[in-house]
Amino acid sequence: MILVACLSVAAQETPASNHAGTLSDLLDKQRALLVVFKSRVIDVNNDERAIIDDVLKGDRAPRGRYAWVYNDLAIKLNKYINKHGSMLPARNLADAEYVIFFNVVEFRRILNALYAYGELFVIVKGSPQELKPPRIVWRAKKMLVATDAIRDLIKDLKRLRGEG
């Protein structure tokens, strides 16, 4: 099973005061869309609304280096999906209940290997019927290598859902 789409997201379970949700908002949600790209948003005020808008309007087809970052993250998520079954891949934004977005900030070459560094976010889609806007419910604690960021998210999801 392969997740189809590209996004990058960083978040933490205990949100900052400007978060409108927590990771527990995912308890009743299964369909996730993975997105990886370099956001055009530079947000000096830490207003997450700009990030959410960029993700919801962004190009979801990974190209070039972003494609291999997407594939690395999708492999990790697919292992989690196959083992626990508490997440399903979404084919597009309309099918997704939440988006896992990795925002590539830079590529670093270390010991002749290339690593993508960035921020990982989990964004729950809004609900117009319930007057709930889209919101970031998890963000990586700091800028990380993509695979380390997704590992932290999976660890938090396992803890939240009681998966060993």
Image (cartoon, rainbow, N blue to C red):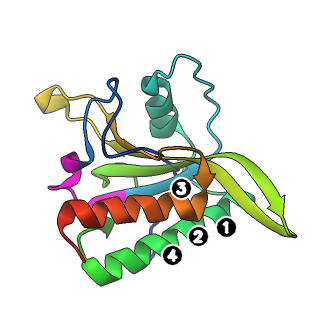
Q: Earlier in the sequence, mark 3 or mark 4?
A: 3
Residue at 45% x, 75% y is: 2
Mark number displayed over residue 75: 4
Inter-mark Cα distance, 2 to 1: 5 Å
Q: Earlier in the sequence, mark 3 or mark 2?
A: 3
Inter-mark Cα distance, 1 to 3: 11 Å
Q: Are marks 4 and 1 in contact (CB under 8 Å)?
A: no
Left or right: 20 with respect to 7? Answer: left
Inter-mark Cα distance, 4 to 1: 11 Å
Indicate the amino acid at tag 4. Answer: Ile
Q: Earlier in the sequence, mark 1 or mark 3?
A: 3
Can the viewer see residue 16?
Answer: yes
Residue at 32% x, 49% y is: 98
Can the viewer see residue 5?
Answer: no
Inter-mark Cα distance, 3 to 4: 13 Å
Q: What residue is disc 2 on?
A: 71
Residue at 27% x, 51% y is: 97
Inter-mark Cα distance, 3 to 2: 9 Å
Q: Earlier in the sequence, mark 4 or mark 1?
A: 1
Indicate the amino acid at tag 3. Answer: Cys
Residue 8 position in % (x across, y down): 52, 50
| Secondary structure state at the residue bearing disc 4 | helix
Indicate the amino acid at tag 2. Answer: Asn
Q: Are marks 2 and 1 in contact (CB under 8 Å)?
A: yes
Q: Nearer the viewer, residue 111 or 68?
A: 111
Q: Please, is residue 4 above or below residue 138 in the view?
A: below
Query: In this picture, which residue range is highlighted in magenta?
Result: 24-32
Inter-mark Cα distance, 4 to 2: 6 Å
